Image (spheres, rainbow, N blue to C red):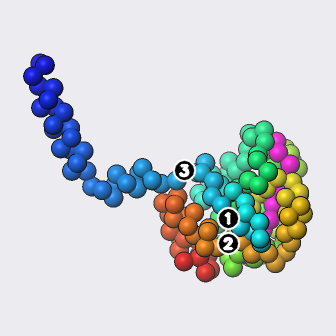
Amino acid sequence: MKHLYPLFTFILALLTACAPESQTSSTQTAAKASTYFPISVGDQILELQLALNPSEQNKGLMHRDSMKEDHGMLFLFKQPQPRAFWMRNTRIPLDIGYFDANGSLLEIHALYPYDENTVKSRSQAVQIAVETNRGWFARNQITAGAQIDLEALAHAIRARGQSPANFSIQNAE
């Protein structure tokens, strides 16, 4: 049995070397939902996790006790439309900024811990929502009209293994 070990090692090495490179490298390099990406809003940098699919979006920032100061979550939707968020199982006081497909900040709302009343957008054209710690927008003098960096967002989407084209974000490529 001992003499078969070198043969087994050689066969295993040969099989590993023959694996298609694209499968091996994309699996190892794809960012996770928990990965933070630097994305500017106005002239301020936020470290944002991306919620790209319904499962990630439904979970959002639930069950967290805190979040670092310049951190948050970006919710990206495939089509612009009115949006509504609530705070089920969310302990952290948050603000939400609603953005259009051009990356322009449309409106900001306060969100209260555990509040299950929906906070609806006034705009019909929301494609991006960013949740931050309460007061982040005000402390950083970010107001309606500020731009989110769509190029950095596109880079983050690609790092998550998806195409920015799937989200119809304008000027993102």
Disc 2 marks a residue whose amino acid type is Asp
- Per the image, label 2 sits on a secondary structure element best described as loop
Q: Position of residue 16 (x, y in %)?
A: 24, 44
Give the residue furthest to the left: 3
Residue 159 within the segment the image draws in magenta:
no
The magenta segment? 91-100
Residue 90 lies, with reference to residue 162, above or below; the image says: above
Left or right: 30 with respect to 104? left
- Per the image, label 1 sits on a secondary structure element best described as strand
* Quarter where residue 145 is shown: bottom right
Q: Choose the circle earlier in sequence order: 2 or 3.
A: 3
Residue 93 within the segment the image draws in magenta:
yes
Q: Are marks 3 and 1 in contact (CB under 8 Å)?
A: no
Q: Position of residue 167 (x, y in %)?
A: 58, 71
Q: Choose the circle earlier in sequence order: 2 or 1.
A: 1
Which mark identifies residue 91? none
From the image, tell me which residue sits under label 3. Answer: 32
Disc 1 marks a residue whose amino acid type is Ile
Which mark identifies residue 39? 1
Report, in whole angstroms, how far the alpha carbon at label 2 lies from the one at label 3. 20 Å
Chief SS of the magenta region: strand
Q: Choose the circle earlier in sequence order: 3 or 1.
A: 3
Q: Are marks 2 and 1 in contact (CB under 8 Å)?
A: yes
From the image, tell me which residue sits under label 2. Answer: 149
Disc 3 marks a residue whose amino acid type is Lys
Q: Position of residue 157 (x, y in %)?
A: 56, 64
Q: Nearer the viewer, mark 2 or mark 3?
A: 2
Report, in whole angstroms, how far the alpha carbon at label 2 lies from the one at label 1. 6 Å
Residue pictured at 63% horizontal, 58% vertical: 37
